[in-house]
Amino acid sequence: MLENATNTAGSNWSAVRSALVAEVLRRGGGPRVRGEIHGESMLPALWPGDVVQIASCSLEDVRPGEIVLALRDDRLVLHRFVAPCTPNGFLLRGDCVPGPDPLFPPEALLGRLASGGEAAPALRPGFGAKWSRALGILLCHCGLARRLALKLHSRRKRAAGEFRNSARATEAGVLR
């Protein structure tokens, strides 16, 4: 998910943001839309806190295995495209969930993942997507493995952030 609201006011604001993102992508023009990942349904391809870019596309342009953004009940869903089912819709599934999402109507598709996350090969269809799905199933069914992976990931991100901040401080000191 790109959004995760916890209270009524937050939920209303989340719905407004989701509608704005949907409108920008449906118009198909201009730059890509950027957003931050919330939730664990796409582990290990996408992690909470990852920043992604979404490019608008049509349902005919999407291939199975690609990660796409869709709108359902005022919420943005970023999951892997399984297949177009009928003229009535398409199926999506998170890498770290046991089964596919309910059928999405064709107009729910907003765009596809253009860039983002840390597992670049897992973002494209093919072997990387299959590997990501297999690891996602493990993380889905083994809570201990998921908690451990999330803890290691957050420590690694924190360490990378501290390294970047110290590098910037060093550059600022050198540039003064």
Image (cartoon, rainbow, N blue to C red):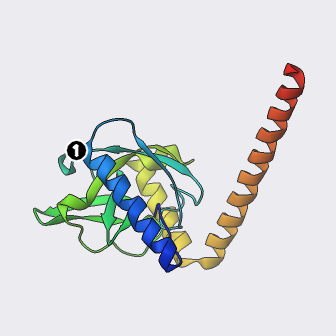
- The one of 86 and 132 positioned closer to us in this rendering: 86
Across and down, in percent, residue 35 comes to 49, 51
Q: Quadrant of the N terminus?
A: bottom left
The residue at which mark 1 appears reads as 61
Residue 151 sits above or below residue 160 on the image: below
Across and down, in percent, residue 41 comes to 48, 67
Residue 55 sits above or below residue 151 on the image: above
Left or right of 79, for residue 42: right
Which quadrant holds residue 69? bottom left
- The one of 140 and 91 positioned closer to us in this rendering: 91
- Callout 1: SS: helix
Which quadrant holds residue 174? top right
- The one of 8 and 162 positioned closer to us in this rendering: 8
Residue 159 sits above or below residue 163 on the image: below
Q: Quadrant of the C terminus?
A: top right
Across and down, in percent, residue 79 comes to 39, 61
- The one of 125 and 107 positioned closer to us in this rendering: 107
- Residue shown at 22% from the left, 44% from the top: 61
Left or right of 75, for residue 150: right
Observer able to see residue 78: no
- Residue shown at 58% from the left, 60% from the top: 48
Across and down, in percent, residue 132 comes to 48, 57
- Residue at the extreme left: 87
> What amino acid type is highlighted by mark number 1?
Asp
- Residue at the extreme top: 175
Numbered disc total: 1
Observer able to see residue 56: yes
Q: Residues within 10 Å of mark 1 (few under 14, many from 20)?
A: few
